[in-house]
Amino acid sequence: MFDKLRSFIDKIKPDFVAGGKFGWLQSTFEAFETFAFTPNTVTKRGSHVRDGVDMKRAMITVVIALVPALLFGMWNIGFQTSLNSMDWPYELGTAASWWYCLWFGFLRMLPLIVVSYVVGLGIEFMFAQIRHHEVNEGYLVTGLIIPMIVPVTTPLWQLALAVAFAVVIGKEVFGGSGMNFLNPALVARAFLFFSYPTHMSGDSVWIAADLWGTDAIAGATPLGELAAGSWPSDTALDMFIGIVTGSTCETSVIAILLGAIVLLVSGIGSWRIMLSVVLGGGIMGLLFNLIGANSYMQLPFYYHYLMGGFAFGAVFMATDPVTSAQTNAGKWIYGLLIGVFAVLLRVLNPAYPEGMMLSILLMNCFAPLIDHCVVSRNIKRRERRGSAVENTRKEVVR
Amino acid sequence: MIKIKKGLDLPIEGVADCRVSDARDIALYAVKPTDYVGLVPRLLVAEGDKVSAGDALFCDKNDVSLRFVAPVNGEVCAVVRGEKRKLLAVVVKADGSQVQRPAEAPVAVDGDLKQRMLDAGLWSLLRQRPFGTVANPAGKAKAIVVSCFDSAPLAPDYDFALQGRERELCDGLEALASLTEGTVFVTFRPGQRLAKVVEQHVASHQKRVSVQYFEGPHPAGNVGTQIACLCPINKGETVWTMTAQDVAVLGDWLHTGVYHPERMVAVAGPQTKNPHYYRVIAGACVESIVEAQVLNPAYPMLDGGMKAEGVRVVSGNVLSGEQIAPDGYLGAYDSLLTFLPEGDYYDFMGWLLPGFNKHSFSRTFASGFVPRCMGGLYQMLPEFMRPKFDTNLHGGVRPLVFTGNFERVFPFDIYPLQLLKACIIGDIELMEKLGIYEVEPEDFALCEYIDPSKTDIQPIVRQALETLRKEAL
């Protein structure tokens, strides 16, 4: 079967190269060809052997890491509706209800994912075509993350607009994947947050009322409750498992931790960033505990890890290799500050119940500066070493 | 002892056994100006000229005292030129006559040694950092580094390759010490047999030769790594290097006064019938070795099940060696010939399948979960789990996206990604600040190997260094 597919591709290939009948579709054709077969290119200059890993493999590893959170998120969409809806067709707690939760969530998530991929990849293919580049795999991850961090009731047209904005303004104007300085998924989230605040925050966006449409059931998230000045009604364990209201797939810390394990074992995600975000959040949380001026400040610091998008952001968004700091020392500083600012924003600014998004975007902007400082130290060290030698030489001459 | 932690050993099959075949009867030899970085050659012979070993074939146009000499007695049978009449090689056909070896005509090791090395054509064995060119005879070296072990994949074992030439090695080291006011560092792995011999010699002669030990994965054996640990290069400084086998050639010349560049070459790699050593003269034509040693049947391929044809002949190691034609010639400084299967096959869903035999520094393939410390035990794995190496790029070229990986295989106090980016944009000032003078392309070879964006890093670094070198002229 592989041989037949291969010979079919080889047969139609001449039409798709420059000058062929469909020459203008070259990048698109290449994207699909390399999807089916890793190309037969051999090394020409430089090292004769190369590592098995390529951008596709690296990106698909991240997608695999997202799967536990995605599956749990789907189930939780259904579960939240089943708890709050009057006309849930199954008795709560039964196996049938459990499976229907997953099916319900799957049907709710599917349009979001499809819209995100169709719009985003469409733009990516267009830009690749215009620039005569190969299509970059970066959007495989971004396109899945975006529907995972919005409320389930987000209207599809808003999502489409946000995706288009994120891909064009967040990425392509800078030259595509690898050149952007803001995390595109968070750009989409921020676009939605500031353009359609009523659809993105408040109490009545988190729980889908029924299988279709944007109707929602009122139900506050733990962060929303805290911002309103009350204590979260969910237990820490509920929040750890993820059976609480929130954005589609970011509620379950357990599922996100599974993803973190995949990223860390494969070496794709940076352990320095993950650890330092957690440390930064913890330090800030403890500081507020010391102050303890209001109930939010008295909240045990580990609650911050369990609520909202902290865990998801630390594992999947802060670690984006393009927009994070690129030096190892820089990664520590970058991560620590993300954690600090996320908790700071949460506690001190009730207008933005979730600080993680803004905190990561802020540090994305500062990542180049952090790197600059770290690299400058290296440069200074080298200069000192050089001038020390220079001085001894002069003394010898004297 | 200095311990290198960052690095990577590639478990490639076909390590050379400690056996020797004599191939000193090979007829054709070439001296290739392209082996010497930045050399602009001036041809001194014509086709048909008779030459003896040590006669100059061409010299450096910018410094005529730098001569590149015939390795054997014979006749110039071809002057190979490429585009724009660029001189690619001068081929000498050996007449089989032995070089006349005077009974004992030792060359004195004194202040005049440099001039005599230049006259005899031995100076070209000495290279300098920065830039990787032949050492500038007018320059001064703050140190000379000789690595007596090679950590590259399939590299020859110098304990074996230099067996019986220990005296020459020690005398060569002594001679090198008279070329510099600084130290001659000679480096070994702990426990090397050769190290004891050299250490004893050094102890009894009190020259400025310092024996150093390095432990750890590749690139621990690269002189670049060792220089970074022992005597980092600052702007304006120069460090010279010579391969251990060439030091032995130098020592031999000191005894006999005759240039006899004999060399043990490991013939190795997955496509080799009987990987073992050949005793050859430098610049030998590899045709007869290729005929005798290359395995031709299609190499068993990766998960996709497709097969590739053809073998790549590499002079040097698979990370930074030079591809040569099957009837090509050994590189001037190389003591390794690698036969590697070409990888021009399509790999069905290569990015999705588990990949038990795809080697990767990351753990994104099933192969990543086979313990890395296995060393020679890879042979014991079932066939489908043994890592297969070929010349496939394993993916498409992409922008540099991932960070933090290069640092794990780059044992320098340098930010590799930042330096690489400075090289790409050609910012000379920034390159200098980030430490370009301390590196050679081969130091970036592992970064290039593990890079998921498949960027050809070594050519970028070489080009940047050439830009700087021309600026400095």
Image: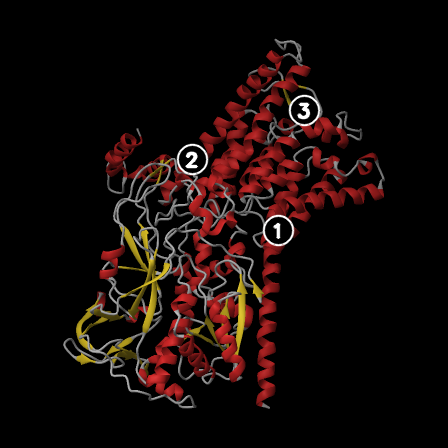
**Contact, mark 2 vs mark 3 (Cβ under 8 Å):** no
Parent chain of label 1: A
Q: Secondary structure at mark 3?
A: loop
Q: Alpha-carbon neighbours of circle 3 within 10 Å: few (<14), some, or many (≥20)?
A: many
Residue at (54, 21) in percent of width and height: A106
User: Is there one chain holding both mark 2 and mark 3?
Assistant: no
Q: Is B148 located above or below residue A102 in the figure?
A: below
- Residue B183 visible in the current orientation: no
Q: Amino acid at mark 3?
A: Ile
User: Mark 3 sits on what residue?
Assistant: A243
Nearest to the observer: residue B374 or residue A393: B374
User: Mark 2 sits on what residue?
Assistant: B353
Location of residue A279 by image quarter:
top right
Residue at the far left: name it. Answer: B48
Q: Amino acid at mark 2?
A: Leu
Parent chain of label 3: A
User: Mark 1 sits on what residue?
Assistant: A331
- Residue B92 visible in the current orientation: yes
Nearest to the observer: residue B17 or residue B230: B17
Mark 2 and mark 1: span between their CA atoms? 32 Å
Q: Secondary structure at mark 1?
A: helix
Camera-nearest label, 2 or 1:
2
Mark 2 and mark 3: span between their CA atoms? 34 Å
